[in-house]
Amino acid sequence: MDIDAARKDTPGCANVAHLNNAGAALPPRPVIEAVAEHLALESTIGGYEAAERNAVAIERFYESVAGLVGARPDEIAYVENATRAWDMAFYAIPFAPGDRILTTTSEYSSNAIAYQQVAAARGVKVEVVPDGRDGVLSLDALSAELERGDVRLVSINHVPTHNGLVNPAAAVGRLCRQHGVLYLLDACQSVGQISVDVEEIGCDMLSATGRKYLRGPRGTGFLYVRREMIAALEPPFLDLHAATWKAPDGYEIRGDARRFESWERYVAGQIGLGVAAEYASELGIEAIRERVAALADGLRERLAARPGTTVLDKGERPSGIVTFTVDGHEPAAVKKAARERGVNINTTSPRSQGYDPRALPSAVRASVHYYNTEEELDLLMSALPG
Ligand SMILES: *Cc1c(COP(=O)(O)O)cnc(C)c1O
Protein backbone atom coordinates (compact mmCIF):
# COMPACT_ATOMS: atom_id res chain seq x y z
CA MET A 1 0.00 0.00 0.00
CA ASP A 2 1.21 3.47 -0.88
CA ILE A 3 1.02 5.18 2.50
CA ASP A 4 2.34 8.50 1.22
CA ALA A 5 -0.41 8.66 -1.37
CA ALA A 6 -3.02 7.71 1.22
CA ARG A 7 -1.80 10.49 3.49
CA LYS A 8 -1.68 13.06 0.69
CA ASP A 9 -5.26 12.11 -0.05
CA THR A 10 -6.19 12.77 3.60
CA PRO A 11 -5.94 16.48 4.41
CA GLY A 12 -6.28 15.84 8.15
CA CYS A 13 -2.96 13.97 8.22
CA ALA A 14 -1.17 17.30 7.86
CA ASN A 15 -2.62 18.56 11.14
CA VAL A 16 -2.82 15.73 13.58
CA ALA A 17 -1.69 12.19 14.42
CA HIS A 18 -5.17 10.74 14.31
CA LEU A 19 -5.38 7.54 16.37
CA ASN A 20 -9.10 7.83 17.00
CA ASN A 21 -10.37 5.97 13.98
CA ALA A 22 -12.80 3.89 16.03
CA GLY A 23 -14.37 7.20 17.01
CA ALA A 24 -14.40 8.90 13.63
CA ALA A 25 -11.70 8.42 11.00
CA LEU A 26 -10.30 11.21 8.85
CA PRO A 27 -12.16 11.20 5.53
CA PRO A 28 -10.22 11.04 2.25
CA ARG A 29 -10.41 13.84 -0.29
CA PRO A 30 -12.95 12.23 -2.66
CA VAL A 31 -15.41 11.83 0.23
CA ILE A 32 -14.89 15.41 1.40
CA GLU A 33 -15.32 16.71 -2.14
CA ALA A 34 -18.43 14.65 -2.88
CA VAL A 35 -20.15 15.92 0.27
CA ALA A 36 -19.02 19.53 -0.20
CA GLU A 37 -20.02 19.57 -3.86
CA HIS A 38 -23.50 18.31 -3.13
CA LEU A 39 -23.98 20.80 -0.30
CA ALA A 40 -22.83 23.58 -2.61
CA LEU A 41 -25.23 22.42 -5.29
CA GLU A 42 -28.11 22.37 -2.80
CA SER A 43 -27.37 25.92 -1.76
CA THR A 44 -27.04 27.05 -5.37
CA ILE A 45 -29.96 25.44 -7.16
CA GLY A 46 -32.16 24.06 -4.34
CA GLY A 47 -32.20 20.83 -2.36
CA TYR A 48 -34.75 18.89 -4.43
CA GLU A 49 -33.22 20.10 -7.65
CA ALA A 50 -29.74 19.07 -6.48
CA ALA A 51 -31.06 15.59 -5.67
CA GLU A 52 -32.52 15.34 -9.17
CA ARG A 53 -29.27 16.38 -10.75
CA ASN A 54 -27.22 13.97 -8.61
CA ALA A 55 -29.72 11.12 -8.89
CA VAL A 56 -27.11 8.80 -10.36
CA ALA A 57 -24.63 9.38 -7.51
CA ILE A 58 -27.41 8.91 -4.95
CA GLU A 59 -28.44 5.62 -6.52
CA ARG A 60 -24.85 4.52 -6.85
CA PHE A 61 -24.59 4.45 -3.05
CA TYR A 62 -26.52 1.16 -3.00
CA GLU A 63 -24.22 -0.53 -5.50
CA SER A 64 -21.07 0.75 -3.82
CA VAL A 65 -22.06 -0.39 -0.34
CA ALA A 66 -23.46 -3.68 -1.61
CA GLY A 67 -20.21 -4.28 -3.47
CA LEU A 68 -18.17 -3.68 -0.34
CA VAL A 69 -20.06 -6.21 1.80
CA GLY A 70 -20.94 -8.80 -0.86
CA ALA A 71 -24.66 -7.97 -0.88
CA ARG A 72 -27.13 -6.95 -3.58
CA PRO A 73 -28.14 -3.31 -3.94
CA ASP A 74 -31.76 -4.07 -3.01
CA GLU A 75 -30.56 -5.52 0.31
CA ILE A 76 -29.07 -2.18 1.43
CA ALA A 77 -30.80 0.67 3.27
CA TYR A 78 -29.30 4.09 3.93
CA VAL A 79 -29.85 5.05 7.58
CA GLU A 80 -28.56 8.02 9.53
CA ASN A 81 -26.30 6.02 11.84
CA ALA A 82 -25.49 2.48 12.83
CA THR A 83 -27.65 2.47 15.92
CA ARG A 84 -30.80 3.41 14.02
CA ALA A 85 -29.92 0.96 11.27
CA TRP A 86 -29.56 -1.79 13.86
CA ASP A 87 -32.77 -0.67 15.60
CA MET A 88 -34.76 -0.82 12.38
CA ALA A 89 -33.79 -4.47 12.02
CA PHE A 90 -33.98 -5.47 15.66
CA TYR A 91 -37.35 -3.88 16.44
CA ALA A 92 -38.78 -5.45 13.27
CA ILE A 93 -38.28 -8.97 14.61
CA PRO A 94 -41.63 -10.49 15.65
CA PHE A 95 -40.59 -11.74 19.09
CA ALA A 96 -42.95 -13.91 21.11
CA PRO A 97 -42.92 -14.49 24.89
CA GLY A 98 -40.33 -17.09 25.82
CA ASP A 99 -38.09 -16.35 22.84
CA ARG A 100 -34.41 -16.20 23.70
CA ILE A 101 -31.88 -13.67 22.42
CA LEU A 102 -28.25 -14.75 22.63
CA THR A 103 -25.57 -12.08 22.69
CA THR A 104 -21.99 -11.61 23.80
CA THR A 105 -20.16 -10.02 26.73
CA SER A 106 -18.67 -7.31 24.53
CA GLU A 107 -22.02 -6.12 23.19
CA TYR A 108 -22.48 -2.38 22.62
CA SER A 109 -24.71 -0.84 25.27
CA SER A 110 -27.19 0.71 22.84
CA ASN A 111 -27.94 -2.81 21.64
CA ALA A 112 -28.06 -4.16 25.19
CA ILE A 113 -30.54 -1.45 26.18
CA ALA A 114 -32.76 -2.46 23.27
CA TYR A 115 -32.61 -6.14 24.36
CA GLN A 116 -33.66 -5.22 27.87
CA GLN A 117 -36.46 -3.00 26.60
CA VAL A 118 -37.86 -5.76 24.42
CA ALA A 119 -37.34 -8.31 27.20
CA ALA A 120 -39.46 -6.23 29.55
CA ALA A 121 -42.15 -5.46 26.95
CA ARG A 122 -42.50 -8.85 25.28
CA GLY A 123 -41.32 -11.47 27.74
CA VAL A 124 -38.20 -12.27 25.78
CA LYS A 125 -35.11 -13.63 27.57
CA VAL A 126 -31.69 -12.13 26.97
CA GLU A 127 -28.71 -14.38 27.59
CA VAL A 128 -25.06 -13.41 27.42
CA VAL A 129 -22.93 -16.23 26.01
CA PRO A 130 -19.67 -16.50 27.96
CA ASP A 131 -16.25 -15.97 26.40
CA GLY A 132 -13.80 -18.74 25.72
CA ARG A 133 -10.26 -18.84 27.03
CA ASP A 134 -9.01 -16.62 24.23
CA GLY A 135 -11.35 -13.88 25.44
CA VAL A 136 -13.76 -13.88 22.49
CA LEU A 137 -17.26 -15.35 22.24
CA SER A 138 -17.10 -19.09 22.95
CA LEU A 139 -18.46 -21.09 20.02
CA ASP A 140 -18.90 -24.15 22.24
CA ALA A 141 -21.01 -22.18 24.69
CA LEU A 142 -23.02 -20.65 21.84
CA SER A 143 -23.59 -24.06 20.30
CA ALA A 144 -24.80 -25.46 23.64
CA GLU A 145 -27.23 -22.57 24.06
CA LEU A 146 -28.56 -23.05 20.54
CA GLU A 147 -29.11 -26.76 21.30
CA ARG A 148 -31.31 -25.85 24.24
CA GLY A 149 -33.82 -24.34 21.81
CA ASP A 150 -36.22 -21.36 21.75
CA VAL A 151 -33.51 -19.08 20.37
CA ARG A 152 -35.12 -16.45 18.16
CA LEU A 153 -32.06 -14.34 17.55
CA VAL A 154 -28.30 -14.40 17.84
CA SER A 155 -27.15 -10.81 17.93
CA ILE A 156 -23.50 -9.92 18.42
CA ASN A 157 -20.90 -7.38 17.40
CA HIS A 158 -18.08 -8.22 15.03
CA VAL A 159 -15.56 -5.87 16.64
CA PRO A 160 -16.52 -4.14 19.89
CA THR A 161 -15.95 -0.51 20.66
CA HIS A 162 -14.01 -0.89 23.92
CA ASN A 163 -11.58 -3.73 23.23
CA GLY A 164 -9.40 -4.97 20.38
CA LEU A 165 -11.03 -8.38 20.06
CA VAL A 166 -12.61 -9.72 16.86
CA ASN A 167 -15.56 -12.06 17.30
CA PRO A 168 -15.73 -15.19 15.08
CA ALA A 169 -18.59 -13.80 12.99
CA ALA A 170 -18.53 -16.43 10.23
CA ALA A 171 -18.36 -19.39 12.64
CA VAL A 172 -21.33 -17.91 14.50
CA GLY A 173 -23.12 -17.65 11.15
CA ARG A 174 -22.60 -21.33 10.44
CA LEU A 175 -24.07 -22.26 13.83
CA CYS A 176 -27.07 -19.98 13.25
CA ARG A 177 -27.75 -21.56 9.88
CA GLN A 178 -27.52 -25.07 11.32
CA HIS A 179 -30.17 -24.13 13.85
CA GLY A 180 -32.28 -21.95 11.55
CA VAL A 181 -31.87 -18.96 13.86
CA LEU A 182 -31.88 -15.29 12.85
CA TYR A 183 -28.48 -13.62 13.00
CA LEU A 184 -27.97 -9.86 13.43
CA LEU A 185 -24.40 -8.58 13.24
CA ASP A 186 -23.25 -5.17 14.47
CA ALA A 187 -20.37 -4.54 12.08
CA CYS A 188 -19.86 -0.93 13.08
CA GLN A 189 -16.14 -1.24 13.79
CA SER A 190 -15.31 -3.93 11.24
CA VAL A 191 -16.62 -2.55 7.93
CA GLY A 192 -13.73 -0.76 6.27
CA GLN A 193 -11.17 -2.42 8.51
CA ILE A 194 -11.44 -6.18 7.89
CA SER A 195 -13.28 -8.26 5.34
CA VAL A 196 -17.03 -8.19 5.90
CA ASP A 197 -18.85 -10.38 3.41
CA VAL A 198 -22.46 -11.14 4.25
CA GLU A 199 -22.39 -14.45 2.35
CA GLU A 200 -19.23 -15.64 4.03
CA ILE A 201 -20.49 -14.52 7.45
CA GLY A 202 -24.00 -15.82 6.87
CA CYS A 203 -25.75 -13.03 8.77
CA ASP A 204 -29.35 -12.10 8.02
CA MET A 205 -28.96 -8.47 9.04
CA LEU A 206 -25.92 -6.25 9.44
CA SER A 207 -25.50 -2.66 10.53
CA ALA A 208 -22.59 -0.25 10.13
CA THR A 209 -21.75 3.40 10.42
CA GLY A 210 -20.13 5.76 7.95
CA ARG A 211 -17.68 7.71 10.06
CA LYS A 212 -15.52 4.98 11.61
CA TYR A 213 -13.22 2.66 9.64
CA LEU A 214 -15.12 3.37 6.43
CA ARG A 215 -13.95 7.00 6.54
CA GLY A 216 -17.34 8.30 5.45
CA PRO A 217 -19.22 11.39 6.64
CA ARG A 218 -20.65 11.65 10.14
CA GLY A 219 -24.40 11.20 10.41
CA THR A 220 -24.48 8.28 7.96
CA GLY A 221 -24.87 4.53 8.24
CA PHE A 222 -26.41 1.56 6.51
CA LEU A 223 -28.34 -1.62 7.09
CA TYR A 224 -28.10 -4.86 5.16
CA VAL A 225 -31.01 -7.29 5.25
CA ARG A 226 -30.89 -10.62 3.43
CA ARG A 227 -33.37 -10.66 0.60
CA GLU A 228 -35.30 -13.69 1.84
CA MET A 229 -35.78 -12.04 5.24
CA ILE A 230 -37.05 -8.63 4.14
CA ALA A 231 -40.72 -9.55 3.78
CA ALA A 232 -40.82 -11.08 7.28
CA LEU A 233 -39.39 -7.96 8.94
CA GLU A 234 -41.89 -5.16 9.35
CA PRO A 235 -40.06 -1.93 10.19
CA PRO A 236 -41.01 -0.33 13.51
CA PHE A 237 -41.52 2.98 11.68
CA LEU A 238 -42.97 3.52 8.22
CA ASP A 239 -43.29 6.61 6.09
CA LEU A 240 -44.38 7.37 2.54
CA HIS A 241 -41.01 6.24 1.22
CA ALA A 242 -40.98 2.93 3.11
CA ALA A 243 -44.59 2.27 2.19
CA THR A 244 -47.15 3.44 -0.38
CA TRP A 245 -50.47 4.87 0.65
CA LYS A 246 -53.44 2.89 -0.72
CA ALA A 247 -56.69 4.84 -0.55
CA PRO A 248 -58.91 4.88 1.35
CA ASP A 249 -57.09 3.59 4.42
CA GLY A 250 -54.39 1.09 3.53
CA TYR A 251 -50.72 0.97 2.66
CA GLU A 252 -48.20 -1.39 1.10
CA ILE A 253 -44.66 -1.74 2.42
CA ARG A 254 -41.81 -1.76 -0.07
CA GLY A 255 -40.36 -5.11 -1.00
CA ASP A 256 -36.68 -4.10 -0.82
CA ALA A 257 -34.44 -3.04 2.06
CA ARG A 258 -35.41 0.59 1.53
CA ARG A 259 -38.47 -0.17 3.66
CA PHE A 260 -36.07 0.47 6.56
CA GLU A 261 -35.22 3.98 5.33
CA SER A 262 -36.96 7.28 5.83
CA TRP A 263 -37.73 9.67 3.01
CA GLU A 264 -35.89 12.68 4.32
CA ARG A 265 -32.18 12.24 4.64
CA TYR A 266 -28.73 13.75 4.53
CA VAL A 267 -28.34 13.36 0.75
CA ALA A 268 -24.78 14.70 0.65
CA GLY A 269 -23.91 12.12 3.29
CA GLN A 270 -25.45 9.32 1.28
CA ILE A 271 -23.37 10.26 -1.75
CA GLY A 272 -20.28 10.61 0.45
CA LEU A 273 -20.79 7.24 2.09
CA GLY A 274 -21.08 5.59 -1.31
CA VAL A 275 -17.80 7.23 -2.33
CA ALA A 276 -16.18 6.03 0.93
CA ALA A 277 -17.29 2.45 0.23
CA GLU A 278 -15.82 2.61 -3.27
CA TYR A 279 -12.62 4.12 -1.93
CA ALA A 280 -12.16 1.23 0.52
CA SER A 281 -13.00 -1.35 -2.15
CA GLU A 282 -10.49 0.17 -4.55
CA LEU A 283 -7.70 0.16 -1.98
CA GLY A 284 -8.58 -3.42 -1.14
CA ILE A 285 -9.84 -4.59 2.24
CA GLU A 286 -7.13 -7.22 2.56
CA ALA A 287 -4.39 -4.61 2.11
CA ILE A 288 -6.16 -2.38 4.62
CA ARG A 289 -6.51 -5.21 7.14
CA GLU A 290 -2.82 -6.09 6.84
CA ARG A 291 -1.65 -2.54 7.32
CA VAL A 292 -4.02 -1.87 10.25
CA ALA A 293 -3.00 -5.13 11.94
CA ALA A 294 0.70 -4.36 11.51
CA LEU A 295 0.34 -0.89 13.02
CA ALA A 296 -1.85 -2.14 15.87
CA ASP A 297 0.61 -4.96 16.63
CA GLY A 298 3.44 -2.45 16.57
CA LEU A 299 1.62 -0.23 19.03
CA ARG A 300 0.80 -3.14 21.35
CA GLU A 301 4.46 -4.17 21.31
CA ARG A 302 5.58 -0.68 22.21
CA LEU A 303 3.02 -0.46 25.00
CA ALA A 304 3.84 -3.92 26.38
CA ALA A 305 7.53 -3.00 26.54
CA ARG A 306 6.83 0.17 28.50
CA PRO A 307 6.89 -0.17 32.30
CA GLY A 308 3.59 0.56 34.03
CA THR A 309 1.53 0.23 30.87
CA THR A 310 -0.93 -2.66 30.43
CA VAL A 311 -2.50 -3.74 27.15
CA LEU A 312 -6.05 -5.04 27.60
CA ASP A 313 -6.96 -6.44 24.19
CA LYS A 314 -8.19 -10.00 23.93
CA GLY A 315 -8.29 -12.56 21.16
CA GLU A 316 -5.68 -14.16 18.93
CA ARG A 317 -6.01 -11.74 16.05
CA PRO A 318 -6.98 -8.40 17.51
CA SER A 319 -8.33 -5.46 15.54
CA GLY A 320 -6.95 -1.97 15.00
CA ILE A 321 -8.42 -0.91 18.33
CA VAL A 322 -5.72 -0.88 21.01
CA THR A 323 -6.82 -0.47 24.62
CA PHE A 324 -4.52 0.02 27.58
CA THR A 325 -3.99 1.63 30.96
CA VAL A 326 -1.10 3.68 32.30
CA ASP A 327 -0.39 3.13 36.01
CA GLY A 328 -1.13 6.15 38.15
CA HIS A 329 -2.80 8.10 35.34
CA GLU A 330 -6.49 8.32 34.60
CA PRO A 331 -7.35 7.50 30.98
CA ALA A 332 -8.79 11.01 30.58
CA ALA A 333 -5.45 12.49 31.66
CA VAL A 334 -3.60 10.30 29.16
CA LYS A 335 -5.93 11.44 26.41
CA LYS A 336 -5.32 15.06 27.36
CA ALA A 337 -1.54 14.62 27.44
CA ALA A 338 -1.64 13.07 23.97
CA ARG A 339 -3.85 15.84 22.62
CA GLU A 340 -1.35 18.41 23.82
CA ARG A 341 1.24 16.71 21.61
CA GLY A 342 -1.05 16.64 18.59
CA VAL A 343 -2.18 13.02 18.98
CA ASN A 344 -5.88 12.13 18.98
CA ILE A 345 -6.86 9.15 21.09
CA ASN A 346 -9.94 8.40 23.13
CA THR A 347 -11.04 6.70 26.33
CA THR A 348 -13.51 3.84 26.72
CA SER A 349 -16.60 4.43 28.79
CA PRO A 350 -18.41 2.00 31.09
CA ARG A 351 -21.61 3.31 29.55
CA SER A 352 -20.80 1.60 26.25
CA GLN A 353 -19.87 -1.88 27.49
CA GLY A 354 -22.66 -2.90 29.83
CA TYR A 355 -22.43 -6.70 29.85
CA ASP A 356 -18.65 -7.10 29.96
CA PRO A 357 -17.71 -8.52 33.37
CA ARG A 358 -14.02 -7.88 32.85
CA ALA A 359 -14.15 -4.41 31.34
CA LEU A 360 -12.48 -1.72 33.38
CA PRO A 361 -14.49 1.39 34.17
CA SER A 362 -12.36 3.22 31.67
CA ALA A 363 -9.24 2.66 29.60
CA VAL A 364 -7.26 4.46 26.92
CA ARG A 365 -8.21 3.61 23.35
CA ALA A 366 -5.87 4.25 20.43
CA SER A 367 -7.35 3.07 17.15
CA VAL A 368 -5.11 3.00 14.10
CA HIS A 369 -5.96 3.17 10.41
CA TYR A 370 -3.88 2.41 7.36
CA TYR A 371 -2.90 6.05 6.85
CA ASN A 372 -1.21 6.20 10.25
CA THR A 373 2.55 5.80 10.49
CA GLU A 374 5.14 4.27 12.81
CA GLU A 375 6.26 7.83 13.59
CA GLU A 376 2.78 8.66 14.84
CA LEU A 377 2.90 5.61 17.12
CA ASP A 378 6.25 6.80 18.47
CA LEU A 379 4.78 10.25 19.01
CA LEU A 380 1.96 8.74 21.09
CA MET A 381 4.47 6.74 23.13
CA SER A 382 6.50 9.83 23.85
CA ALA A 383 3.35 11.69 24.91
CA LEU A 384 2.31 9.10 27.53
CA PRO A 385 2.64 10.50 31.05
CA GLY A 386 4.65 8.93 33.87
C1 LIG B 1 -20.01 3.17 17.30
C2 LIG B 1 -20.67 1.86 17.50
C3 LIG B 1 -22.06 1.72 17.33
C4 LIG B 1 -22.96 2.90 17.08
O1 LIG B 1 -22.75 3.53 15.86
P1 LIG B 1 -23.44 4.95 15.60
O2 LIG B 1 -23.17 5.25 14.17
O3 LIG B 1 -22.81 5.89 16.56
O4 LIG B 1 -24.89 4.79 15.87
C5 LIG B 1 -22.60 0.46 17.45
N1 LIG B 1 -21.83 -0.61 17.72
C6 LIG B 1 -20.51 -0.53 17.89
C7 LIG B 1 -19.72 -1.76 18.17
C8 LIG B 1 -19.88 0.71 17.80
O5 LIG B 1 -18.56 0.81 17.98
Image: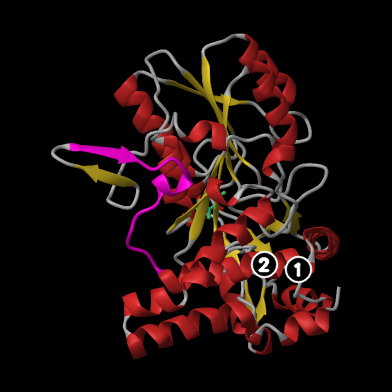
Q: Residues within 10 Å of mark 1 (few under 14, many from 20)?
A: few
**What residue type is disc 1 on?**
Glu
Q: Is residue 366 above or below residue 8?
A: above
Q: Quadrant of residue 139?
A: top right
The quadrant of the picture occupied by the C terminus is bottom right
- State if disc 2 and disc 1 touch (CB < 8 Å): yes
Separation (CA) of disc 1 from disc 2: 6 Å
Which residue is located at x 81 percent, y 84 percent?
Answer: 4
- Total number of numbered discs in the rendering: 2
Question: Of the numbered discs in the image, which one, if any, rests on residue 293?
Answer: none
Q: Which residue is mark 2?
A: 278
Which residue is located at x 73 percent, y 58 percent?
Answer: 320
Position of 73 with respect to 83 (left or right) is right
Which residue is located at x 50 percent, y 79 percent?
Answer: 35
Q: Quadrant of residue 272?
A: bottom right
Q: Is 253 within the magenta?
A: yes
Q: Is residue 3 above or below residue 267?
A: below
**What residue type is disc 2 on?**
Glu
Position of 290 with respect to 50 (left or right) is right
Camera-nearest residue between 233 and 184: 233
Q: Which residues are magenta?
A: 250-266
Q: Position of residue 381 (x, y in %)?
A: 76, 73
Q: Is residue 196 visible?
A: yes
Question: Of the numbered discs in the image, which one, if any, rests on residue 282?
Answer: 1
- Find numbered disc 1 in the image and state the secondary structure of the residue it sits on: helix
Q: Position of residue 263 (x, y in %)?
A: 33, 58
Q: Is 261 within the magenta?
A: yes
Camera-nearest residue between 35 and 105: 35
Q: Position of residue 307 (x, y in %)?
A: 80, 62
The quadrant of the picture occupied by the N terminus is bottom right
Q: Position of residue 91 (x, y in %)?
A: 39, 35
